[in-house]
Each structure stands twice: as structure tokens, then as C-alpha cells.
Amino acid sequence: MHSFLQDLLFALRTCRRTPVFAVTAVATLALGIGATTAIFSTVNAALLRPFPYPRPDDLYAIGQRFVDGSLTSGLIAPVEFTRLNRAGSSVMRAAGVNRFDTTLLRDDAAPMRTEVYSATEGFFEVFGLPMTLGRSFAHEDHFPRGPGFVVVSYRAWRDIFGSDPGIIGRSVRFSDVTMTVIGVAARDFDVPHAADFWINVRIDPMGLGHGFQSYLRAQPGTRPDRLRADLATLMAGIVHDLPGSGENGRAFVIEPFASSVIGDLGPLLLVLLSGTVLLLVLTCVNVTNLFLARGSTRVREIALRAALGAGRGRIARQLVTESLVVAAGGAVVGWWLAYAGVRVLLVLGASRLPRLDAVPFDSRVVLFTVATLLAVGALVGLAPAFQLARTDLRESLSEGGRTGSKGRGTYRTLAAMVIAEVAVAVTLVAGAGWLTRSYANLSTKSPGFKTDGRLEFEVILPFSRYRPPEVISWSHNLFEQLRKMGGVVAVGSASTFPLRPAIDNTPVVSVIGVPVDPTRPGVVARMRMVSPGFFDAMGMRMLNGRGFTDDDRQTTAPVAIVNETFARRYMPGRKPTAMQLAWGFPAPDLKTQRPIVGLVNDARHAALSIEPEPAFYLPLDQSPFWRQAVVVETKLADPTRLVPLIRAEVKRLDPQLAVEPEAVSAIVASTISRQKLGMDLMLVFGAIALVLAAVGIYGVIAYGASQRTGEVATRMALGASPSNIFWLIVDQGRTLAVMGAVIGLAAAYATGRIASSWLFQVHASDPLILVASLGLVLTMTLAATVIPARRAARVNPLVAMRAE
């Protein structure tokens, strides 16, 4: 212990005597440790932090699909809950929710849009968290014609109701109904994400309508393969007992609850963590180079200590202690950089991503930082210690501090390190290129509609006050008033807006006169309702026929419009406007038969990365809908200038409605926000890697040039020109850069092969990314050799030879 304290004090004195070296090393390590810790903290929050629910490994999200791959909502029907909750299977309990956003009415404040979910029996029991206040729904709460109860989320209780402990038993008034509060959910309960309220729903236990986002808890110790086998048996029983529930073959689909929450965020975070680990390796190599170069100037000091009785082990321990002191300084500064970096990430939008509303610096992050500190300290300190082991200390002492062969050995070690630096830099820059390419592919992918100069907002008309005629009248009145606003070009509405949570029905359709493939009877499509003017307001194109007009009313012949994918898949080679369709569930109902009057271009609804689905559209006046996504096209450069006017107009028409207009361009951008965040971070890492590689190669070439001062002087005395000396030194740097670049190119291709499965339309062999990253790193590293080369070319041979 005493010797360790001696080593520690000596290390601190050494750093104080060489402040430039100490500050440079600490700052470099802080950069690498800080970036790695920041990204690890987000990985910890999203992927490693345990979910708060008891036995989270037994939780699954459950959906269903057609075996033949036909389009389906993927949601669960009431009859499937009935079978899932029967005793005797590996399912302990299953339940689901159905979203229906509404307006919260408050006596002392403006109406407020809220996310409300109707929950089936046993929903809270699936997750097993006790209520903060009150109780969850009881069995009798789901009886027909029973009272309406509501459970409030902890966040809504805190933010809306001021954490009022007397909220239990109070009435909460929504635009459609007034309900009694019976409970406040647990602080950590967040299913579905950002839900504000849950209400008790009554379902027909034999209902076939697939409308519930669902979850199940398996019996303790149940393996996924056993659970899937039991679910297959349950579905087979449903199809057998209830004709029409799945003639073309349905199957349950399960996903671990954690995976369903994280989604594609997990692979992105792992890519970023891999990038920061490479960046940390790069900083370690740079600092190791600093220690090696510094060690070559301390050979006489170390030789004197050896002559005075210090063994090689004792000296090596001292060197490792010095590196640990520097690493500790880098870790402390890096910790604060990481903390600040995480705060910046949250401000930039990471807080809207799953499980990243809070990124705690908990014990796991502390242990990671400590482990990184020890690993970095050991790695940085072992290189000069190993170099020392190969040095003849007696010879060093007799040479009076001249480096001789030891300097050449140190240079070879430094050169190997620089090759590694350049290779890592190429890999990191290529990684930034992969993520940039992925983001560019997504951001330039046409959604099928125009985004500039457009606003979108949702209106939810209370069913209790608006019957179909009132819905039609109110909507026409709103559209008319919006069109009168300055700068407005077109207005329309739809039941579902692209790239928003979908609430579309997915019925079975029949194109009259087109034979049905007996091997694929499940001809299904999304059914959407739109108003006249919607396609114009969205900038969508009619490819054939006409759009809806004000003449498409309830008193006129019913009509429909289909999209390109519908026409291509279900009526290939036929003219859509010469066909008729019908729909229904579980089979098409000929009472719904109507002519197709138009063909509209495809729009991406699920995501920019997902191909459009077959869809057909019905006119607003013939199929009134209470929830409408209203689109306003304007000539204004900044359409958000209309937001106050729109709010005022909606309030004038109905003071109990709350709307939140948003730019359509912002809606589209938000769907790829995580990809943009990943791209931005990797670009930062790539830039840092370029700088570190350039600094590293500059230091090594400068050190090598200083070791060759005598050689340079001799060459110049024998007639070598400054130009000859310049290119002699440049060749050293060029050789190291090319060797590192070749290794880096192979590493970049290998990492690209792995990352391409997570990114959008990215190929590891993309020549532009590989050549660009290679050229960028080579340019930076070769440029870093010019300064020491020019300095060597200006050496005065007489002065240099006198110094030797």
C-alpha cells in the first residue's frame, strides 16, 4: 500500500512537471470515454435496464396473421381473448386495449386532447404492478350496461390533476362521456406508451372484430416454443368452431414484450455503441503513442532508477500507475462530458424514443465507466512497459540518453499504432457513411404525397352529439371556413393520416368479375374514408378516372376509389374504372357493391420503409366518420402561421374540441428521427476519428523525423535537396496511411455486411461510401505528414550535425 501511494504521488508530480502532455492525454481520453459512456447510458436505459413488471420475461405482445401472408390488421378479436384465457394452456392471462383519442373537458382550463384506451378484463393484471391509488377494473366492471370507470396514468395524475390524493371517486368529463376515477396507475406503468387514461370496455366474448392491441403473460417457466405450440392449438380450435373466423388460415404471432417496446431502436443503439467503442480504441492508441514518445525521452531517467536498484517490475508498475492517473482524469472529465451529452441527446429528441424519457446514470453506468478506466489505464500503460522490457538499461545509461536503436524500436511500435489508428478511422468514417446513406434513402423516399406548405390536425367529434348528418354538416362548415383563410389553397380530411397510428378497417374484398384464387381466398385491403378535396390537399394524383366531389352524397349512387397497389394486385391487366368492388367480414357483402370511379397513386401509411398496402377509399358524405385528419394546403412558406387561426375557428364551431395543428413536413420527419439522430452521432464520431488519426500520424512522423535528424543532415551535406528530404519524410507517412487504409477498408466492408441488415437499402459494397471514406482518411493523414516533412526539409545540416 505504501509503495502504491509512492507511485501515485510520483505520477501526480510527473504530470505536474509536464502539463502539456497531461492535459493532452486527459482531453483525448475524456473524448473517447465520454462518448462511450454517453451511448452506453442510453443502451443501458433502453436495452439493459430491467422492466418494472414482475417476471418481465413471461410478458409477450400478441397479434395474429394470415398464414398465406395476406394483409391483416394484426390485432386480436374478443373471441380470441375468450380462448386465450381458458384454463389449461400455457397462457396465464391475456388482455388488450383499443385506442380512441378524445377530448378531456376541464372546468378551469381549455379542452385537452388525451390518449384514451378501452381495456379488456384483466389488462392491468397481465403486467402485475400495484396501483398508486385506488384499484384496477374488477370482473363486474366489464358487465354490459355497467357504470363507466376510468384509471388515470401516473403522468396524467401528476401533470393534469396536480397529484391530487382525493382523485378517487371524482368524475372525469370527456367529450363523449363522464366517468368515475377508480385508480391511478403505477408510476412505471406505461402500456401503451404515453397512454393518459384507460376505461373499462364491454366486449362480446364471441366477437370476431379484430381491433385490440394485445398482451399476454405466460405461465412461469414456459418456453417460447411451448407457448407457440399451445397458441397454434388454440387458433386451430377457433377456426374449427367458428366458421368464417379464418378460412385462409390464421396464426397467433408473439413477440417478447421488451422487443415490442424497443423495436428498431435496439439495433441502432448497438451500432452507435460499436462506433463509440472504436472511437475509444482510437483515443487509447493516440494516448499510447503519447506515452511511447514521452517514454523515449525518459530512457536515461529510467536507466538511472534501474541503476539505483529499481527492478523492471517496479518500473513497469510505476508506468502503469502514471497511465491510470491519466485515465482517471480522462474518466472524470469524460463522465461530465457524457452527462452533458445525454442531456443534449434528450433535447434533440431522444426523450421521445421508447424508454429514453429518462436516462439514469445508475450503478451499471458507474461500473462501466470504472471498468473502462481500468482497461484504458492498463492498455495505455502496458505499451511503454513492454517497450521498457526490450530496452537494455545499461546501454541506455552509457549512451548518455541518446536513443539509437531504442528510438528506432519505439518508432516501429508507434508506426504499428498509427496503422491501427488509420484502420479504425476508415471503419468509423465508413460507418458514418452507412448511416448517412440509410437516412438519405429514407428521407428521399417519396411518401406518395407532398409535405411542403401543409398542415394536419385531428378532429374527434363526440358520437353523443354528432350523428351522421351532423358530422357531414359540421365538416362541410369547417372546410368552408378554412378555405376562406388567407393563403389556403385546398382542404380535405381522411379517417387516417399517413404515417400516423392506423385505425383502418381491413375487410375482405371482392372485385366483381375477377376470379378468386382458391389457394389465396383472403383478398383484403385497407378501407379509408376521405372527403372531396383530400387528394388535392395532399398533392396526390388521380391516375385514372375522377376523385370524389360534392355530388357523391348519401342520396346518390355509392362509389369507391382504389390505389395502385389494389389495382395491380387484385385486378391486373384490367381498367379499374370499369370494375366494381364489395367488402365485408368474414366475407364480402354484396350489399356494399359499388363502382370504382378512380385510381389514385399509392401513399405510404405504415412507414417510409414499408411498401404501400392495397387500399380503397369511400367518400365522406356516404360514409361519415367521427375522427378526421384534416389537411390544409397553403401558399405560405411557413404554414404554421395559420395554427392560431385554425384553433380559433374550431373553437368557434365547437368550444369543447381541442386540436393541435402540425406541419406535415414535421410529421414525416418525426418518423425517421431516430435514424437522423444515429446519423448525426456517427458523423460526429467520424469527424473525431479523422482528427485523432491526423494528430496521431503527425506525432509519429514528427517523432520519426526527429530521430533521423543526423541522417537528414548527412544526406543534405552530400547534396540532397530540401525537396528530396520533404518527399523522404512524406513517404514514411504515406506508407503508414496506405497500410492502415487497406486494413480499414476490409474492416469497413465486414462491419457494413453486419449493419446492412439493420439499415435501409444499404449495401456493404457501396463503392461511393468505401472510396469516399478511404479518400477522406488518406487525405487527412497524408496532409498531417506535410508539416513535419516541411520542417525536416528546412533543417540546417551544420546545426543538426553539431547537435549530433
Image (cartoon, helix red, strand yellow):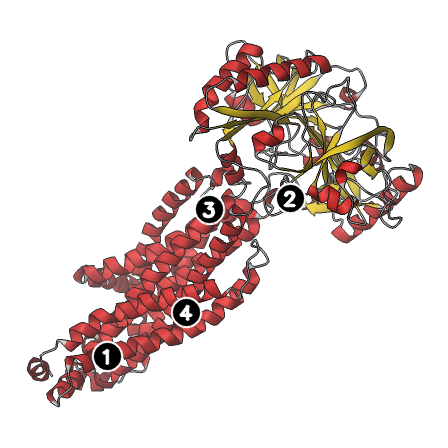
The numbered disc on residue 260 is 2
The dot on residue 727 is 1
Under circle 3, the secondary element is helix
Q: Distance between the residues labelled 4 and 2?
A: 37 Å
Give the residue at x 13% y 88%: 719
The amino acid beneath tag 1 is Trp
- Closest to the camera, between mark 3 and mark 2, is 3
Mark closest to the chain's N terminus, 4 or 2: 2
Circle 3: residue type = Leu
Q: How crowded is mark 2: few (under 14 residues within 10 Å), some or many (20 or more)?
A: few
User: Which image quarter holds the N terminus?
Assistant: bottom left
The disc at residue 423 is 4
Residue 97 drawn at (x, y percent)? 70, 30
Distance from disc 3 to disc 4, alpha carbons, whole Å, reads 25 Å
Which residue has dot 3 on it? 677
Task: Please give the label number shown on residue 741.
Answer: none
Decide if residue 609 is on the left or right side of residue 326. right
Which of the two marks, 4 or 1, is nearer to us in this view?
Answer: 1
Q: Please provide percent x and percent y for residue 739.
A: 39, 76
Mark 1, residues whose alpha carbon is within 10 Å: few (<14), some, or many (≥20)?
Answer: some
Determine contact: label 3, label 4, CB under 8 Å.
Answer: no
Q: What element carries label 2?
A: helix
